[in-house]
Amino acid sequence: MLAVMTGLALSAPAVAGVCAAPRDQVALKTRVLQSNLMVAALTCGLRPRYNAFVTDFRSELVTQGHILRSFFRRSFGASGERRMNAFVTRLANEASLRRTRDTAGFCRRAETVFDSFSAQHGAVVKTIATSTRMAYPRGVEGCPQEAHATLPPALSEEAANTAVPPIQP
């Protein structure tokens, strides 16, 4: 079923010259997935499904967002926030272009993703994000194994409970 979703993110933007540890890769893929679903919500009439997704997976989306922010800060220092915002904007723009090129296919694939969350009753976002090319951040390579030892510890529970707003009707 997840193979059907591959067409949604064929050209996610690269973060040139940076490697991503496994947990950073999950955060990047989660953001690509969320951006695709957000564009589908706004352009395919899927707002209720996106809002349910954000509500159901709020904690995980926030946690992955904090990991993504940390990745950009570690990778780009003082310009990390600006570069992350540009990355997220580019993801949305590219998703919108893909939707324009194949509206029916894009919307159908997004519905399949929403269906997969519903069918898997509690499937975690990172499981789906890491198992579909829909969430592939092309151009971001994995770090060599020895680089993983220098990663900061996981975020606190308090940080994981920060709100992710749904799309307003």
Image (tube, rainbow, N blue to C red):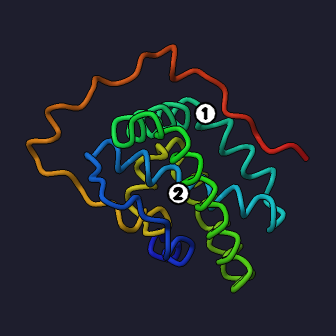
Which residue is denoted by mark 1 in the rendering? 58
In the rendered image, residue 140, in percent from the top left (x then y), is placed at 34, 60
Q: Is residue 130 left or right of residue 162?
A: left
Q: Secondary structure at mark 2?
A: helix
* Contact? badges 1 and 2 (CB < 8 Å): no
Calculate the distance from the C-alpha at mark 1 to the C-alpha at mark 2: 16 Å
Residue at the farthest right position: 169
- Three-letter amino acid code at the position of disc 1: Arg
Q: Nearer the viewer, residue 28 or 132?
A: 28
Q: Residue at x 39, y 35 (%)?
A: 77
- Three-letter amino acid code at the position of disc 2: Val
In the rendered image, residue 89, in percent from the top left (x then y), is placed at 64, 55
Q: Secondary structure at mark 1?
A: helix
In the rendered image, residue 15, in percent from the top left (x then y), is placed at 40, 58
Q: Nearer the viewer, residue 69 or 125?
A: 69
In the rendered image, residue 27, in percent from the top left (x then y), is placed at 43, 45
Residue 32 disc label: 2
Q: Residue at x 53, y 57 (%)?
A: 32
In the image, residue 102 sits, relative to residue 143, either above or below, namely: below
Q: Earlier in the sequence, mark 1 or mark 2?
A: 2
Q: Residue at x 52, y 41 (%)?
A: 122
Residue at the farthest left position: 146
Badge 1: few (under 14), some or many (20 or more) residues near its Cα, within 10 Å?
many
Q: Nearer the viewer, residue 72 or 3?
A: 72
Residue 89 disc label: none
In the image, residue 151 sits, relative to residue 158, either above or below, namely: below
| Quadrant of residue 51 within the rendered picture | top right
Badge 2: few (under 14), some or many (20 or more) residues near its Cα, within 10 Å?
many
Q: Residue at x 74, y 52 (%)?
A: 49
Q: Of tags 1 and 2, which is closer to the observer?
A: 2
Q: Is residue 13 left or right of residue 36?
A: left
Q: Nearer the viewer, residue 5 or 66?
A: 66
